[in-house]
Amino acid sequence: MIYILDDDNAVRDSLTLLLESHGFEVENYASADEFVRSCKPRDHACLILDHHLPGVTGLDFLASAEVADLDLPVILITGGADPGIRKRAQELGVVAFFEKPVTEGPLLAAIGGALGGA
């Protein structure tokens, strides 16, 4: 299971199509609030998290108590990165970091690593 949390409809749609074409089950969410309200995380899953969300950064969301207990590997994507974002992502245990547009091969490799070689 791959969860996508990104406020951009086009990004969510394209990632969903890509991942479903590779056999993944996908759920996507437009906001952190929607994710917290609706997501029921499963084993053998990961989260693709946009850094620039409405009202909160992806990393602040990741550090929040609301997601601290989810124990999901996280792949962070962003439209623009700086060394501070990369450093904080590493400190929070993000397993992979990509700038948009994300390319298929590296993303699939990161998902495979996040899911333990799936």
Image (spheres, helix red, strand yellow):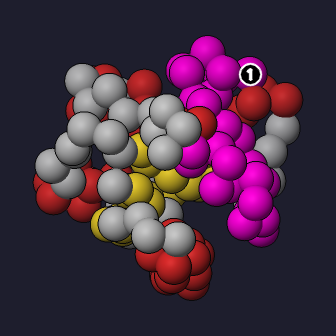
Asked if the stretch drawn in magenta spans residue 18, the answer is: no
Q: Quadrant of residue 70?
A: top left
Question: Is 26 left or right of 41, judged from the image as shown?
Answer: right
Q: Nearer the viewer, residue 13 or 24?
A: 24
Indicate the position of residue 29 as horizontal and vertical percent values: 34, 66
Indicate the position of residue 3 as horizontal and vertical percent values: 38, 56
Which quarter shows the N terminus?
bottom left
- For the residue marked with disc 1, what is the amino acid? Lys
Indicate the position of residue 17 as horizontal and vertical percent values: 51, 82
Tell me which residue sits at (20%, 53%) in the image. Answer: 39
Instruction: Evaluate whether residue 71 shows in this view.
Output: yes
Residue positioned most to the right: 83
Tell me which residue sits at (51%, 52%) in the image. Answer: 48
Residue positioned most to the top: 91
Asked if the stretch drawn in magenta spans residue 102, the answer is: yes
Tell me which residue sits at (60%, 31%) in the image. Answer: 95
Residue 43, placed above or below residue 100: above
Mark 1, secondary structure of its residue: helix
What range is drawn magenta here?
87-112
Tell me which residue sits at (80%, 45%) in the image. Answer: 81
Q: Quadrant of residue 15?
A: bottom right
Callout 1 crowding tier (Cα within 10 Å): few <14, some 14–19, many ≥20: few
Q: Nearer the viewer, residue 101 or 117?
A: 117
Question: Is 103 left or right of 91, judged from the image as shown?
Answer: right
Q: How many marks?
A: 1
Residue 96, placed above or below residue 1: above
- Residue that badge 1 annotates: 87
Q: Nearer the viewer, residue 26 or 76?
A: 26
Indicate the position of residue 64 as horizontal and vertical percent values: 35, 28
Instruction: Evaluate whether residue 59 shows in this view.
Output: no
